[in-house]
Image (cartoon, rainbow, N blue to C red):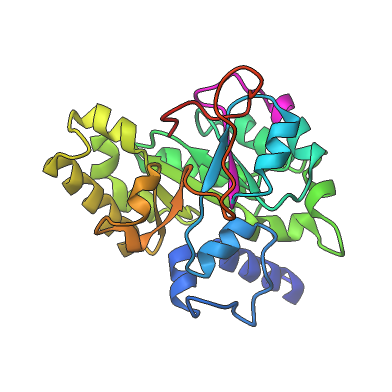
Amino acid sequence: MSSSSKRRIVSSLMAVAPLGVLAAQQPVQGQDPMKPKLYNTAKQKIREGKQVFSFTQTKFDIAGYCEAAKHYDYIWFEMQHSTLEFKDIEAMIAACPRAPATPMIRLPDAQEWHIQHATDIGALGIIVPTVDDVDRAREAVKWARYPPIGRRSTGQGQAAGIWGINGIDYHQTIDDNMLVVIMIETPTGVANCFDIASVPGVDVILVGNNDLSQFSGFAQTDPRYQELITKIHDDTLRAGKIFGQANATYATGHPLSKDAKFFQNGPSNDGWKPPAAGRGNPSAPPPGER
């Protein structure tokens, strides 16, 4: 094997090192001088020890998306519980490329074609719901990253044209910039959380708060529910990964809030508030969306 090939493999392996380990190896604030800043700005902020929040996009609305993308850390395109299609998201990302908010998609599953479509249209992160075991987590990682780490195929989507600018080689840098988020939403997922979080290439473990309450039968105020949350927290950090919550009320005031970095919804970066849901405002997230 040539020396250049060895360097590429080593670089690729470093790219999917546990994000929590990366954060532990560098100052909470500031950038490691040996690592260039990421164009996935949400992932960059997490590396710096910051919390990141999203706007949840559930409708095809180019103007609404481009406006919301000015004010948040990332956009959560919702494909599990909405009628959004890939062509809709493709058009929105293309309309305001490289917006301040990182584009990410919650998919309904970890199938190859879903992840391939998501990455080819320019998403810099995927969110996979209801993960109960390591197999589903491994599938997510496998299709989200190029060889030798994963098995993502090289396509002709718009992603390279959006992110491969100013001398950046998209195909050589995207593995480091991709953010793979795994949702734990059932007691089975909680039981297997450490093994799931330990899968190489998984970056974030996100609690699906509403579904975890539904699947467990415990209200979120129930001490037994809090025990489940604590186990997810402990297992995630022990695996060296980032801990997140779908319920942004856990961002402050909760005993685990200091360790939670990744949230669905939550406050904008500049105080901007989305328009109220209703006629004429198709991009506004429905009440209670998590």
In the picture, measured across the screen, residue 229 lies left or right of residue 87, that is: left
Nearer to the camera, 64 or 132: 64
Q: On the rendered image, what quadrant is the N terminus found in?
A: bottom right
Give the quadrant of the C terminus.
top left
Seen from the viewer's position, the closer of residues 175 and 288 is 288
Residue located at (32% from left, 31% from top): 211
The vertical placement of 101 against 87, above or below, is: below
Taking the spot 57% from the left edge, 55% from the top edge, the residue there is 269
245 shown above or below 214: below
Q: Position of residue 191 (x, y in %)?
A: 23, 43
Quarter where residue 154 is shown: top right
Which residue in the rendered view is the most extreme toward the bottom?
Answer: 33
User: Is residue 78 highlighted in magenta?
Assistant: yes
- The image shows residue 227 at horizontal and vertical percentages of 17, 48
Figure disc tally: 0
Horizontally, is 66 left or right of 51 in the view? right
Name which residue lies at 81% across and 60% down. 169
Residue 233, above or below 6: above
Asked if residue 18 can be seen in this view, the reply is no
Give residue 39's quadrant in the image: bottom right
In the depicted view, which residue is nearer to us: 187 or 261?
261
Extreme residue in the left direction? 223
Q: Residue at x 64, y 30 (%)?
A: 113
In the rendering, at what x and y percent does residue 214 appear? 26, 27
In-image side of 260 versus 235 (left or right): right
Asked whether residue 187 is drawn in magenta, I would say no
Horizontal side of 277 relative to 100 (left or right) equals left
Q: Do we see residue 28 in this rendering?
A: yes
Magenta span covers which residues? Answer: 73-89
Residue 70 location in percent, x, y? Answer: 68, 48
